[in-house]
Image: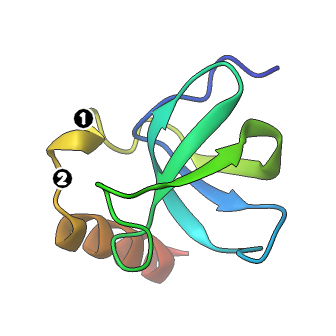
C-alpha cells in the first residue's frame, strides 16, 4: 500500500463511473481517500474511494485542502487542466 498518498494532492480516478475524473484529495487513511471536485463532490460531502482506484498526478498541490472552498477547488482543478 502506498502510504505517501495524503491530503492536498491531485488525482485521477482509475476505476468506477467516474473513470478519468480529476479530484483533490481532501482526506486519506491507510485504506481509503476522500475526493472532492468542488461541483458534484463537495468538500463537505466528498467521494470515498479505495486508494488503489486513484492515480496521483501532482504531489504537494495544497498544504491544507480543508481551508479551501468548493469554488477554490473548482478553480484549482480548472487551472491544472489548462496547464496540461
Residue 17 located left or right of residue 70: right
Query: Which image quarter holds the C terminus?
Result: bottom right
**Which of the numbered marks, if any, corresponds to residue 68?**
2
Q: Secondary structure at mark 2?
A: loop
63 or 82, which is in the foreground? 63
Q: Secondary structure at mark 1?
A: loop
Rendered residue at 67%/48% (across/down) = 49
**Which of the numbered marks, if any, corresponds to residue 5?**
none
Spatial CA span between label 1 and label 2? 8 Å
**Which of the numbered marks, if any, corresponds to residue 64?**
1
x and y percent of residue 70 in the render? Answer: 23, 67
Rendered residue at 38%/79% (across/down) = 78
Residue 74 located left or right of residue 40: left
Residue 29 located left or right of residue 78: right
x and y percent of residue 31 in the render? Answer: 71, 26
Rendered residue at 61%/29% (across/down) = 5
Amino acid at each position: 500500500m502506498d502510504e505517501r498518498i495524503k491530503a492536498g494532492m491531485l488525482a485521477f480516478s482509475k476505476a468506477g463511473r467516474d473513470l478519468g475524473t480529476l479530484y483533490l484529495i481532501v482526506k486519506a487513511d491507510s485504506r481509503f481517500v476522500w475526493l472532492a471536485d468542488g461541483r458534484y463532490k463537495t468538500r463537505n460531502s466528498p467521494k470515498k474511494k479505495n486508494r488503489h482506484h486513484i492515480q496521483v498526478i501532482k504531489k504537494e498541490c495544497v498544504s491544507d485542502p480543508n481551508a479551501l472552498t468548493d469554488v477554490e477547488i473548482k478553480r484549482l482543478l480548472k487551472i491544472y487542466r489548462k496547464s496540461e
